[in-house]
């Protein structure tokens, strides 16, 4: 049995990771300050003696007694709504938090995996985006707090790898969706599902022709799990290369939910990326990984889960 630390373990992806590691018969230590995480995401794990919850802000300090085999740093606001509401906390967890958690990995001699993001590519001028692309990011725009926090985190992880020989991994996560997403957190899929099930108008920003590539959380977690177990440092894109427009996404969610919602248009936010599609050549070659769940099937499963939640209307 190995000991795995997951910061942000009560968040959307973090909670699924905790579940996956417990399923592989590991001890899991979840560290979360619950700014954006939710205890409902991990309530079913609290009865497991191998699962330990620590309420703490890794931007201030982190100490874990005993041996640690791997540290996965997933603590951060992740939606535009959240990092606009918590800009300083977002920067702090990307900088101070990453520094503290890397220090833990160094002291314990453990493997370290950083949750980075496709947002390091900004509004990309290269399409699809390979890991070799340096990005097109506005550091002082409204999205800059998240983009630069992730870019800094990557630099810090590699500095610890080169200077202290910490065994680091970097995953660049593309738009991920599935059960346990928060209602109306500013991301397209939870917004659209909430509105469709409530029979409300669905606002699409701009023309709706901007594209994204959506990966079901089950596939995302499997790719992250494989990367952690590999010898590859990264960064590595883990996402679904199936690209679709936001307009097509809204129409598909209306169809799958059986809703009568109408699509309306709103002004496009500043620095909103026009395209987003991962090049997953590295993941296919090194991890033998590619997504298995189609966007439509993932949406069906997510909508069915959504209907069982108290917030479903």
Image (cartoon, grey):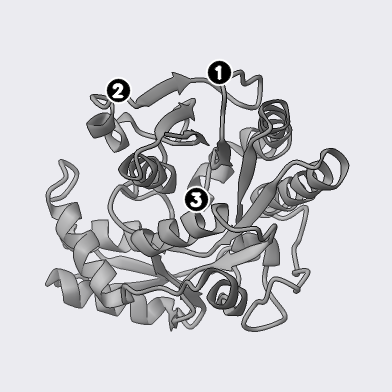
Circles 1 and 2: CB distance less than 8 Å?
no
Report which residue position mark 1 lands on.
66
Q: Residue 309, position in %: x, y?
A: 16, 45
Report which residue position mark 3 lands on.
79
Which residue lies at the image location 50% right of the left edge and 36% below the top edge? 6
Question: Is residue 152 visible in the rendered structure shown here?
Answer: yes
Question: Is residue 142 visible in the rendered structure shown here?
Answer: no
Which of labels 2 and 3 is toward the front?
2
Query: Within the image, what quadrant is residue 63 found in?
Result: top right
SS for tag 2? loop
SS for tag 1? loop
Which residue lies at the image location 30% right of the left edge and 37% below the top edge? 41
Q: Residue 202, position in %: x, y?
A: 30, 67
Q: Residue 164, position in %: x, y?
A: 83, 38
Image position of 310 with respect to 106: above or below: below
Report which residue position mark 2 lands on.
49
Q: Earlier in the sequence, mark 1 or mark 2?
A: 2
């Amino acid at each position: 049995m190995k000991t795995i630390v997951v910061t942000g373990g009560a968040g959307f992806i973090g909670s699924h990771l905790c579940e996956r590691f417990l399923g592989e018969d590991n001890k899991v230590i979840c560290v979360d300050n619950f700014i954006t995480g939710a205890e409902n995401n991990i309530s079913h794990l609290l009865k497991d003696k191998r699962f330990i919850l620590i309420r703490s802000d890794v931007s201030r300090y982190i100490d874990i007694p005993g041996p640690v085999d791997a540290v996965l740093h997933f603590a951060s606001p992740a939606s535009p709504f959240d990092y606009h509401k918590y800009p300083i906390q977002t920067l702090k967890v990307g900088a101070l938090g990453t520094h503290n958690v890397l220090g833990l990995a160094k002291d314990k001699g453990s493997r370290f995996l950083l949750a980075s993001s496709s947002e390091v590519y900004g509004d990309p001028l290269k399409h699809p985006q390979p890991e070799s692309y340096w990005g097109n990011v506005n550091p002082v725009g409204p999205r800059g707090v998240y983009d630069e926090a992730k870019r800094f985190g990557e630099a810090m992880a590699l500095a610890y790898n080169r200077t202290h020989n910490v065994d680091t991994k970097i995953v660049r996560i593309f738009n991920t969706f599935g059960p346990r997403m928060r209602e109306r957190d500013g991301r397209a899929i939870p917004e659209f599902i909430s509105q469709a099930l409530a029979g409300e108008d669905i606002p699409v920003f701009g023309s709706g022709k901007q594209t994204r590539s959506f990966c079901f959380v089950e596939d995302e977690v499997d790719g992250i799990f494989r990367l952690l177990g590999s010898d590859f440092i990264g960064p590595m894109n883990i996402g679904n290369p199936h690209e679709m427009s936001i307009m097509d996404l809204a129409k598909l969610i209306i169809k799958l939910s059986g809703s009568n919602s109408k699509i309306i248009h709103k002004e496009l936010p500043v620095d909103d990326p026009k395209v987003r599609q991962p090049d997953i050549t590295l993941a296919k070659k090194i991890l033998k990984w590619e997504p298995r769940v189609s966007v439509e099937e993932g949406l069906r499963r997510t909508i069915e889960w959504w209907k069982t939640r108290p917030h479903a209307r």
